[in-house]
Amino acid sequence: MWGPTVSGSQAHAIESAAGTAGLDPTLAAAYSLAEAEAHAQGVPLSITSGYRTPAEQEALWEDGIRTYGSPEEARRWVLPPGESTHVQGRAVDVGPVQGAQWLEANGNRWGLCRTFDNEYWHFELATVPGGVCPPRLPDAAER
């Protein structure tokens, strides 16, 4: 897929990265640019989870409750479908660790920010390109 983006005063087409289907178009474009730059620098980076359907998120939520023993503890790691930014197409989980570290250090160039202290892999658009990322929340339950 191709999507428009603007760099400086020139608009050009970028190829969307794998895993961007269903994402907010601005997030998909920002992530695609970041991934291309990471790869150009020899850093492996890919989406491990992007958009999720409500049914997919519900299954993760129910599994989280079983795994962590209560809805309160599960909320630290997974949210119900009505609250998840993945269901809204506004979040990506990335890997491997090296790629996530690179994106944390460089993602603000495209507006991408790590959101939670306990999830090194979770990124959202949280600033303007080139801006400063807001402080991370301890976990998803704090949202």
Image: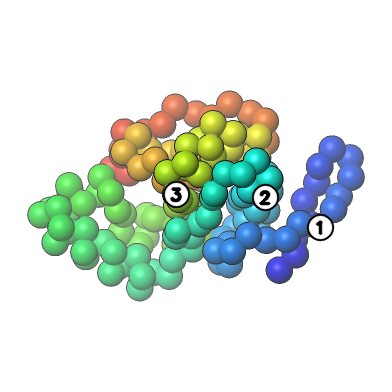
At a point 86% along the width and 50% down the height, the residue shown is 11
Tag 1, which secondary structure?
strand
* Residue that protrudes farthest toward the bottom in the picture: 55
Give, as a three-letter code, the residue at label 1: Ala
**Identity, as a three-letter code, of the amino acid under mark 3:** Pro
Among numbered discs 3 and 2, the one appearing first in the sequence: 2
| Quadrant of the image containing the C terminus | top left
Q: Position of residue 92 (x, y in %)?
A: 49, 53
Q: Tell me if mark 3 has few (under 14), some (14-19) or many (20+) residues whose alpha carbon lies within 10 angstroms of its own.
A: some
Query: How many C-alpha atoms fall within 10 Å of the one at disc 2: few (<14), some, or many (≥20)?
Result: some
Marks 3 and 2, how far apart at CA? 15 Å
The residue that disc 1 covers is: 13
The x, y position of residue 112, in whole percent, is 57, 40
> SS class of the residue under badge 3?
loop
**Circle 3 residue:** 96
Residue at mark 2: 36
The foreground one among 49 and 57 is: 49
Which residue extends farthest left? 69
Q: Is residue 126 visible?
A: no
